[in-house]
């Protein structure tokens, strides 16, 4: 097994890393301290490791780091910060959508992917969009509220612009 | 952690076929949603993986000589939003919408779903009723295998280790044809099928009677066509009696086994019930359409 | 079912400024932007990676264990087996308390020495330079088993001649209730209804698998950063590792879900042993599969109710029998069984009652705490039994319940007087009203059903444990507040509630409060985050400490304003004269004044729950819990009678929470708890055959996705009669308890026949319909 130098573009930052082929994108991201990307099952069952890869949400545990060489990767932490949170992050905090928080980063990335495609989703569409992200604390309702709140807010902002 | 392996990253299809030809211990890697899970569980131990997911030659859906041709590395999400699939592969589109979950759908490929050879592959029953063929390419050979002959047993296919699935193709169904897919899982998203059913009504504009095709998943070592049921339905009107009988025949075509998700008897019974329901709905819809 | 209830008594709750408002939780934004650091996120310089070698046999003698090859592997720092341990036993006790007895020789060993009793039992530990090397080392461990006959069914395990898991027999615990004369009560009945209900093993399936990192410091203290519900395990850890109690320091992190599964020790002792041996930092994180293998499960129960009832609906007597499968080691099984026993007949007055319950050892995965802690299993049985009785009497299920509900001042099954409000009738009525009319369907194959359940679930620990909590509140010289309290935060908002209470009492906003929690050495010990006790216990301790600070502030301000302290109040970061709010002083200035005077601006308070003596296991009689939360949940389902598929259409939870400290968090508990209850009813089961789990990951052990649930409407009632701060009751566990039986009752209502075993799989639905057809 030979290591190779690859480039991971994460949240707008370029990382040159030399990795073995059997390293998953999840492992690579966490080693680069993107610890908002969580390890919950390593087989695509829970969605805690969800990130955007070239604009599509995926389970980073089921992608090899080499397969992401040169791709655009976006994690929840790339959306906003404590000082300047993304509207989804803000809404999640306000709506009670965050309990233990372990599913939250994956959930927000899934919600963001939905709103990118569909700025005004129905409850059914939201449930579908987050159906690959397990949450054991909330029963999902406040998460759905948060997504709806964000959609409304973002549409209002757009209307004002 | 994943076990050790070599990973080759071809940039073109010929390059990939060249790499496939070099050893028999290679395994193509596309979406990885099954393969990486198996590698991690040490259920599969290839020495070398060949990453074909990014090959442009294997993407896309196109019309070719009266066929719909789907690149093997088209993802399930690609199928879900493709207009050609919506029109000419209705049951497949429906399967794509209930396939695993949105994250998996963005990675899993149609070729991978078939190559894995699972009896529960959700893309298989729709493709069976569409009469799909699998296009296999190696460095020196090219062949097309009907899907019914492609999967030969649980996790077994006729794909030679040096071959790649490059495309899945099926004849464009006649205008007015209808396809439906129904899966039963133990929850409403991200569930392995306890059983699945695809039914297709091929509208014969030649004046011949419409043809019905029925395929079943997760109830035999491979996804299967319910031939006896199809024969019974062939040519005749869809009366409740015929439908009931066909549903029974479909169930008899299964070789269901029991596992953690359900018993063999349950599977057989629900096949009967759901085939009956799908055919009844189909009969109702076509009747309504004619009126 | 009728939807007309009596009016609730009018309450005169004091107006509060922060409590009861839907404020953003103090921990929410960090989690939302992904900066909160969880146990598995920590790394340290020179850190080793650990793995655990586990049994593949459910019942075997270890003939030979050879770790030499693993030790010789380059990069392996250390391999430990039972031979290397100072004391083999893991103390699976209720930590930090007094008054309980343990069955000798049945504690789980840290590492198996001579034999193994379940698949997944730890046998050896490896620490290596990389995770890959540690995994490789596991493969080099050689073990030879002599397979012994095992027993996998509690009903088999109590038969004479069954393999004995721990001497002298397989009965891990037993409790009895003898109240009145059950025989006579049954004899006086017009009708006797008997049913046996079963519930399965289930997994907590928190999204965060167990993880931790440990290191030794310059004082030879073993530091363990870990996700745990119980930082006070430090004592047990110290004992197992063979160091004094003050040489183990547990630093709890924010927890990615617990639900009881992180109540027992998980990775801590392994980490402590390895770091002590190597004197290097060590990290151990379970994979999902290892988590499912290694941690406790919810107990399966077999519960039989034989209930006598008059034609008018009055219950005359009942005999209840409960058997739980404790798995291979007892852990908290005796107490889980105790909870189930105490609530076995539900919130109903039954004067003639006999309850016999046993917990039985098997070679299955071990069972221990899980949200609801026996009370949830009991409710699945008693609430289905109530519906079956109503059906047999041809009576409305709510009417039957109303006749038998406990009322405030009544004595429960074990003779404890209930002093707080019991609003079951109102809760059921409101929940059913919110459910509304059944949806109509055109398809004959689809049957719609509605059902509800009303339950009681304790909050606060068993009183003979003599539970206490401590909290420290201080005001800084700029008027900001610090709360220090050892309570671990599971994600349910435990820390936030404490901050809210301090903010309320000291007249600041929530954002002015900073908290430090979940540390066994640095924050005051606050006990476990279990048993729905933190708001009650640490909430009261925080309230007390904050009031002590408030008193100092008001006394000093009184001097300043030449007013009586009673005439002053704190709000908006100010102290002011109530009758003349224009006269005010900032809290910052006031606390500086206090500091100049050398006044005590930081207070540590202890809250002690009411203590009681241990009850007699041969006949439980007396006080056992500080109080109960009474709840209702109503459900509407659609059942496909051709496939057996169940869809939950509507869900309403109605709970008297005493006082909603943070309404959004309460709603979140009700929605999240009921989601777990619905999962319990419909799909969750750790399937175990011959001791081997057939559902080893989250693709086989299914929990609800967003598509499996409707939005649960949370109706929050506030009687103000709880024993928590501001009259609050607990909601963590009570949120779950009524949901599963409500689903079961709705399904029975839809299809006209009872399914006695959870989960209600499609296959079981069809089997029940077949039985009904056969008659």
Image: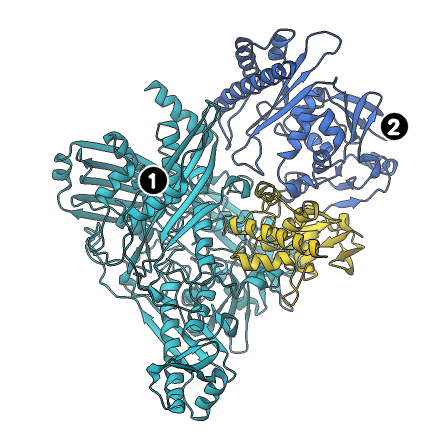
Q: Are marks 2 and 1 on the same chain?
A: no
The residue at the point 28 percent across, 61 percent down is C626
Q: Can residue C149 be seen from the camera position used here?
A: no
Q: In the figure, the cyan chain has which letter? A: C
Q: Which residue is drawn at 39% across and 66% down?
A: C527
Instruction: Give the residue pinned by disc 1.
Output: C154
Q: Is mark 1 on a helix, strand or loop?
A: helix
**Quarter holding residue C438:** top left
Query: In yellow, which chain?
Result: A
Which of C160/B20 is in front?
B20
* Chain to which the residue tagged by mark 1 belongs: C
Disc 2 and disc 1: Cα gap in Å?
A: 62 Å
Chain containing mark 2: B
Pointer 2: residues within 10 angstroms few (<14), some, or many (20+)?
A: few
Q: Position of residue C530 (x, y in %)?
A: 40, 59
The residue pinned by badge 2 equals B140
């Amino acid at each position: 097994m030979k290591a190779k130098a690859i480039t991971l573009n994460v949240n707008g930052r370029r990382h040159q890393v030399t990795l073995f082929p059997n390293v998953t994108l999840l492992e690579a991201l966490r080693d680069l301290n993107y610890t908002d990307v969580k390890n919950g099952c390593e087989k695509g069952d829970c969605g805690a490791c969800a990130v955007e890869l070239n604009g599509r949400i995926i389970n980073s545990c089921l992608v090899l780091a080499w397969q992401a060489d040169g791709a655009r990767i976006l994690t929840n932490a790339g959306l906003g910060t404590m000082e300047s949170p993304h509207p989804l992050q803000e809404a999640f905090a306000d709506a009670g959508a965050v309990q233990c928080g372990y599913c939250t980063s994956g959930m927000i990335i899934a919600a963001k992917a939905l709103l990118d495609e569909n700025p005004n989703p129905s409850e059914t569409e939201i449930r579908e969009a987050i159906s690959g992200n397990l949450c054991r604390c909330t029963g999902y309702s406040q998460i759905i509220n948060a997504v709806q709140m964000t959609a409304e807010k973002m549409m209002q902002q757009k209307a004002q612009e | 952690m994943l076990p050790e392996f070599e990973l080759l990253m071809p940039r073109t299809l010929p390059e990939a076929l060249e790499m496939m030809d070099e050893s028999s211990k290679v395994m193509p890697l596309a979406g990885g949603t099954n393969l990486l899970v198996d590698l991690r569980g040490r259920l599969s131990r290839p020495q070398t993986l060949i990453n074909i997911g990014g090959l442009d030659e294997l993407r896309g859906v196109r019309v070719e000589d009266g066929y719909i041709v789907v690149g093997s590395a088209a993802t399930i999400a690609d199928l879900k939003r493709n207009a050609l699939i919506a029109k000419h592969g209705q049951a497949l589109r429906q399967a794509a919408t209930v396939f695993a979950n949105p994250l998996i759908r963005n990675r899993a490929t149609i070729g991978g779903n078939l190559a894995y050879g699972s009896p529960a592959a959700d893309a298989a029953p729709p493709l069976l009723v569409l009469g799909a063929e699998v296009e296999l390419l190696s460095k020196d050979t090219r062949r097309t295998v009907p899907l019914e002959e492609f999967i030969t047993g649980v996790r077994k296919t006729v794909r030679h280790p040096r071959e790649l699935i490059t495309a899945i193709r099926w004849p464009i169904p006649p205008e007015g044809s209808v396809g439906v897919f129904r899966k039963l899982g133990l929850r409403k998203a991200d569930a392995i099928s306890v059983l699945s059913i695809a039914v297709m009504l091929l509208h014969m504009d030649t004046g011949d009677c419409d043809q019905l095709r029925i395929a079943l998943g997760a109830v035999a070592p491979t996804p299967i066509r319910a031939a006896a049921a199809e024969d019974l339905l062939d040519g005749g009107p869809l009366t409740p009696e015929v439908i009931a009988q066909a549903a029974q025949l479909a169930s008899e075509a299964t070789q269901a086994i029991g596992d953690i998700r359900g018993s063999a008897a349950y599977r057989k019974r629900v096949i009967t019930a759901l085939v009956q329901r799908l055919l009844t709905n189909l009969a109702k819809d076509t009747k309504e359409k004619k009126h | 079912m009728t939807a007309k209830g009596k009016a609730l008594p009018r309450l005169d709750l004091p107006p509060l400024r922060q409590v009861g408002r839907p404020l953003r939780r103090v921990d929410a934004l960090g989690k939302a932007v992904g900066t909160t650091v969880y146990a598995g996120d920590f790394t340290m310089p020179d850190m080793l990676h650990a793995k655990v070698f586990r049994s593949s046999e459910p019942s075997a003698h270890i003939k030979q264990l050879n770790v030499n090859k693993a030790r010789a592997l380059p990069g392996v720092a250390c391999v430990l087996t039972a031979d290397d341990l100072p004391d083999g036993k893991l103390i699976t006790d209720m930590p930090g308390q007094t008054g309980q007895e343990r069955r000798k020789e049945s504690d789980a060993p840290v590492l198996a020495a001579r034999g193994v009793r379940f698949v997944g039992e730890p046998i050896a530990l490896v620490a290596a330079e990389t995770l890959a090397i540690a995994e490789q080392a596991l493969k080099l461990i050689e073990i030879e088993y002599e397979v012994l006959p095992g027993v996998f069914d509690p009903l088999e395990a109590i038969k004479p001649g069954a393999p004995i898991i721990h001497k002298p027999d397989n009965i891990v615990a037993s409790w009895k209730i003898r109240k009145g004369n059950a025989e006579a009560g049954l004899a006086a009945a017009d009708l006797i209804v008997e049913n046996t209900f079963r519930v399965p093993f289930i997994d907590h399936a928190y999204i965060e698998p167990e993880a931790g990192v440990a290191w030794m410091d310059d004082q030879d203290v073993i530091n363990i950063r870990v996700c745990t519900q119980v930082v006070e395990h430090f004592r047990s850890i110290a004992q197992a590792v063979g160091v004094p109690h003050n040489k183990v320091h547990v630093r709890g992190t924010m927890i990615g879900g617990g639900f009881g599964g992180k109540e027992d020790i998980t990775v801590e002792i392994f980490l402590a042993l390895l770091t002590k041996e190597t004197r290097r930092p060590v990290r151990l994180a379970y994979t999902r599969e290892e988590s499912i293998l290694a941690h406790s499960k919810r107990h399966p129960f077999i519960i039989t109710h034989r209930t006598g009832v008059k034609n008018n609906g009055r219950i005359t007597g009942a005999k209840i029998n409960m058997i739980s499968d404790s798995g291979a080691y007892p852990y908290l099984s005796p107490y889980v069984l105790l909870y189930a026993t105490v609530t076995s007949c539900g919130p109903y007055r039954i004067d003639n009652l006999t309850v016999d319950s046993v917990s039985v050892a098997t070679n299955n995965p071990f069972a221990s705490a899980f949200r609801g802690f026996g009370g949830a299993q009991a409710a699945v049985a008693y609430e289905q039994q109530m519906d079956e009785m109503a059906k047999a009497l041809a009576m409305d299920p709510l009417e039957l319940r109303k006749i038998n509900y406990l009322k405030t001042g009544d004595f429960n099954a074990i003779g404890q007087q209930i002093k707080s409000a019991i609003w079951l009738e109102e809760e059921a009525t409101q929940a059913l009203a919110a459910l509304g009319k059944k949806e109509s369907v055109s398809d004959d194959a689809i049957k719609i059903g509605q059902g509800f359940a009303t339950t009681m679930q304790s909050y606060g620990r068993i009183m003979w444990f003599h539970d206490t909590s401590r909290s420290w509140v201080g005001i800084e010289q700029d008027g900001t507040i610090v709360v220090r309290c050892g309570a671990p935060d599971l994600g349910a908002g435990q820390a936030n509630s404490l901050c809210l209470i301090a903010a309320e009492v000291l007249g600041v906003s929530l954002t002015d409060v900073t908290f430090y929690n979940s540390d066994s050495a640095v924050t005051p010990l606050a006990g476990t985050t279990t048993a729905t006790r933190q708001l009650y216990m640490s909430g009261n301790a925080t309230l007390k400490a904050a009031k002590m600070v408030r008193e100092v502030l008001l006394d000093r301000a009184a001097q300043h304003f030449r007013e009586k302290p009673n005439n002053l109040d704190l709000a908006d970061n100010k102290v002011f004269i109530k009758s003349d709010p224009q006269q005010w002083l900032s809290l910052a200035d006031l606390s500086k004044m206090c500091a100049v005077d050398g006044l005590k601006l930081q207070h540590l308070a202890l809250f002690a729950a009411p203590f009681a003596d241990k009850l007699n296991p041969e006949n439980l009689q007396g006080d056992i819990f500080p109080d109960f939360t009474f709840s209702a949940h109503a459900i509407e389902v659609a059942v496909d009678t051709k496939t057996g598929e169940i869809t939950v259409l509507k869900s309403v939870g109605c709970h008297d929470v005493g006082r909603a400290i943070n309404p959004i968090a309460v709603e979140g508990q009700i929605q999240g708890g009921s989601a777990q209850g619905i999962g319990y009813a419909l799909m969750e089961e750790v399937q175990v055959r011959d001791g081997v789990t057939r559902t080893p990951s989250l693709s086989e052990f299914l929990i609800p996705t967003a598509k499996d649930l409707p939005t649960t409407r949370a109706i929050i009632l506030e009687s103000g009669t709880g024993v928590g701060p501001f009259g609050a009751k607990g909601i963590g566990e009570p949120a779950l308890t009524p949901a599963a039986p409500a689903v079961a009752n709705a399904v029975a209502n839809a299809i006209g026949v009872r399914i006695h075993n959870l989960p209600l799989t499609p296959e079981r639905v069809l089997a029940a319909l077949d039985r009904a057809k056969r008659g």
